[in-house]
Image (tube, rainbow, N blue to C red):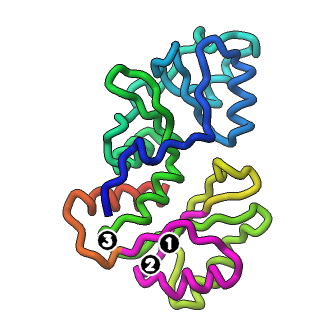
Amino acid sequence: MPALLAEDLLNEMIPPLKGTDSAGKAARWLDEFHVAQLPVLDQRRYRGLVTEADLADFDDPEKPLSELTLGFADAYVRPDQHFYRVMELAIENKIQLVPVVDERHEYAGVVTIADALAAFGQQPSGGQGGIIVLSMEERDYSLTQISRYVEENNAKIISAIVAQDEVDPYRIRLTIKLNTDNLARITATLERFGYVVTAQFSGTAVANEDEQDRFDALLRYLNV
């Protein structure tokens, strides 16, 4: 399987903000697109990410974002960087999306941690245990029920993380870490009960040290 690069995973659904946009618009867009951060541009150049915490300090919704000191100005990847680097930056900075910026520092788009996780699940690698990414409507989410289906196949959920689906506001993505890398029967059971498995990772293949380090970082992320 060819390596997936950041430019292969750009999320077209999440727009950037401009410095001339107001704090009120930024707050509306964070809510509308169900994200905790959004990139802010000066012309086409990336300035940083605006967060919900940043906007909490803005008492005037009409103030432009150019008056705000932004964080995460250095939290970006180049288009030709491996998607592993996207995951590493998201984990290191505890952010939901990572901007992609070219060599002229012009903005190309963003990659979300959910998309990077899904890409990770499609890659052959190593490690103990397995990871499954599920998509479902919010009303169908029950970790107790999902745990029961998993335990019926002689496995256990070690940790889980829930994220809003960036495309469909009525759906969520659930990433579960399991104590087994034998996922075939578990995914078949989950799909039989209507859950959509969007990605899975089984640690049965031999990985090199670099891949193992990144897999371990992902597991630490899921344990947060």
Estimate how packed mark 2 is, as few (under 14), some (14 to 19) or many (20 or more) residues with alpha carbons within 10 Å.
some
- Point out the image quarter for the N terminus: bottom left
Estimate how packed mark 1 is, as few (under 14), some (14 to 19) or many (20 or more) residues with alpha carbons within 10 Å.
some
What are the residue bounds of the magenta stretch? 174-202
Image coordinates of residue 158 in percent, x first then y, are 50, 72
In the structure shown, which secondary structural element does the residue marked by tag 3 occupy?
strand
**Sequence order check, earlier mark of 2 and 1:** 1
Identify residue type, mark 2. Answer: Asn
Identify residue type, mark 1. Answer: Ile
Image coordinates of residue 110 in percent, x first then y, are 50, 37
Residue at image coords 52%, 88%: 185
Which image quarter: residue 196?
bottom right
Label 2 – label 1 distance at C-alpha: 6 Å
Query: Do the numbered discs 2 and 1 sit on residues whose CB atoms are within 8 Å?
Result: yes
**Which mark lies nearer to you, 3 or 1?**
3
Is residue 203 shown left or right of residue 39? left
Residue 83 painted magenta: no
Q: Which residue is mark 3?
A: 127
Q: Which residue is mark 2?
A: 179
Residue at image coords 37%, 28%: 102
Q: Which mark is residue 158?
A: 1
Identify residue type, mark 3. Answer: Gly
Q: Which mark is residue 112?
A: none
Residue placed most toward the observer, 170 or 44 = 44
Residue placed most toward the observer, 9 or 149 = 9
**Sequence order check, earlier mark of 3 and 2:** 3
